[in-house]
Image (cartoon, rainbow, N blue to C red):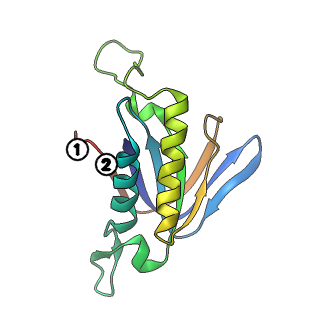
Amino acid sequence: MRAVVQRVKKASVTVDGQVVGKIGKGLLVLLGVGQGDEEGDAEYMAEKIVNLRVFDDEDGKMNRSLLDVGGSLLAVSQFTLYGDCRKGRRPSYDRAARPELAKALYEKFVEKAKGFGVEVETGIFQALMAVEILNDGPVTLLLDSKREF
């Protein structure tokens, strides 16, 4: 499982002209599920992300987590995180999970994040979404549950 995590002042996702998910201060998580991912990957990512110390403390150092600051999380499915661009000019998505598995693990990630007491908003799985963010910092991190990077 892969994630692009962005610290935001606000973020929203729109489908067919309707806002389906919206947060204020918190984290935008673009989440991709790969072949071979399991429930443990979703659990790992949820725990890791809600506890990332990427928010400033009173001294201006990134020492606080989403839990510490009472921030929200916007989770958006993003199979293109498994796009392999090393060969040719058209990305290959062979390593992305099939939609049935990807949806189940995306939903497991959301459930686990909510289990930590975090307010979680989402996009709509497999929908064409417009994501709007006001990045804070900017702070952008890449995570991989298999620790490939």
Q: Horizontal placement of 34 versus 118: left or right? A: left
Q: Secondary structure at mark 1?
A: loop
Q: Is residue 117 above or below residue 19?
A: below
The furthest residue to the bottom: 58
Residue 93 image offset from top left, x and y in percent = 42, 22
Residue beneath the point at 77% across and 44% down = 17
Asked if residue 121 lies left or right of residue 27, the reply is: right
Residue pictured at 42% horizontal, 71% vertical: 66
Q: Is residue 83 above or below residue 109?
A: above
Q: x%, y% of residue 76?
A: 54, 47
Q: Nearer the viewer, residue 116 or 18?
A: 116
Question: Which one is nearer the viewer's eye here, 1 or 85?
Answer: 1
Q: Quadrant of the C terminus?
A: top left
**Residue marked by disc 2:** 143
Give the quarter of the figure containing the N terminus: top left
Q: Residue 115 location, x and y as percent?
A: 49, 66
What type is the residue that disc 1 sits on? Arg
Residue 86 in the image, given as x and y percentages of width and height:
28, 20
Residue type at mark 2? Leu
Q: Nearer the viewer, residue 57 or 53?
A: 53
SS for dot 2: strand
User: Distance between the Cα atoms at labels 2 and 1?
Assistant: 7 Å
Mark in front: 2 vs 1: 1
Residue at the far top: name it. Answer: 88
The answer to whether residue 27 is seen in the rendering is no
The residue where tag 1 is placed is 147
